Image (tube, rainbow, N blue to C red):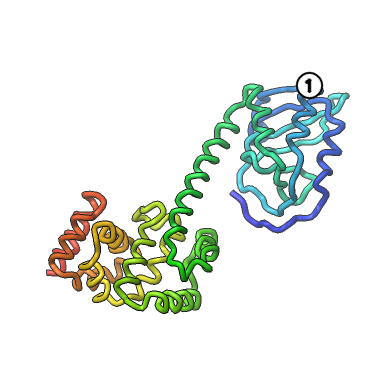
Amino acid sequence: MAFGGTSAGGDPVALDRVLAHAHGVRVREMPGDAPTLLEERDPIAVRALRDALRVADLSGFVCMCWGDVVLEFFDTDERPLTTVTLHHGYSIRWDGWPRDALLADGVRSLEWLAVRGIAVPLREYRVAEQRQAEIDRTARLWVAEIPAPLTPYTDIFLDTSTSGGGLTGPQVAAARALLSAAYPDAVDRILRLCAWYAAGTGAYSGYPPYERIPAQFLDLENHTDFARAVDLADDAAIADAVRYLISWDTRKRLARLLSALSPAARRKVLVHARDAESRRWLERRIAGLQ
């Protein structure tokens, strides 16, 4: 929804000075030619909305959507005073600033609307809040499984979801050197990496993107060492390894990995596939080796 992030400059209280002259406000959906949803002239209510629009920072970002609603303020003579667009309970857009501004307490403006019958923006805000809480929870689970030598890279790992790519070659090399020094036994190292790979959402899709990072290290492990790790793994570790085997990025080396597995290990892999579709997919790949 947004881009940028550095301060845009400007006066963060400029809007508040303008709103000090507001006598009333009309609320309309976006885009701007939509019908009026609400007209408020009560001075206490208008003052409450003004307080709800206080700005914390002119952060330099621009939301990429139209906004939830537009607030059209007017003065005592009913003349247009200024307009403000609300965006998701986080920011506002006003012609007096070159970029959007972050609200000090954005939910107050949505609550102001909700008590006057415009409840959708607040409801969407709460849904987004819950979604973000779940994203944060899965990130914490994934971070908890990062091997101890790599914890200094935690922020770099998580930031890859924003940048849209994985670790760079030099980052992988530096982190892998720490990993190999701490866990010189390849089987031990592989099992730890598989556990890390399966943490977080545990999805096969590779989303969130940072969850694909352990695969960058697993890809560098020898396929025969991977086979030994599967042979020695317990049930939980087998399930972790299956997630790596079935991921999209592993497919370029899947045949070699499956070929290295013993018949017993292949059976274990099939047993611990998370669903019937994944099991059938692996069965076809294993059958294709013969």
Q: In this image, 3 relative to 224: left or right?
A: right
x then y, percent, for residue 145: 42, 60
x then y, percent, for residue 6: 70, 58
- Name above or below for residue 215 compared with residue 19: below
Residue 90's image quarter? top right
Q: Nearer the viewer, residue 279 or 200?
A: 200
Q: Amino acid at mark 1?
A: Arg
- Name above or below for residue 244 compared with residue 108: below
Residue drawn at point x = 62 percent, y = 40 percent: 88
x then y, percent, for residue 164: 50, 62
Judged from the image, the secondary structure of the residue bearing numbered disc 1 is loop
x then y, percent, for residue 7: 74, 56
Residue 124's image quarter? top right
So how many labels did they put on this image? 1
Q: Quadrant of the C terminus?
A: bottom left
Q: In this image, 88 relative to 152: left or right?
A: right
Q: In this image, 17 relative to 110: left or right?
A: right
Q: Nearer the viewer, residue 267 or 287?
A: 267
- Name above or below for residue 239 compared with residue 151: above
Residue 19's image quarter? top right
Residue drawn at point x = 78 percent, y = 48 percent: 97
The residue beneath circle 1 is: 41
Residue drawn at point x = 57 percent, y = 37 percent: 125
Mark 1 neighbour class, 10 Å CA radius: few under 14, some 14 to 19, many 20 or more: some
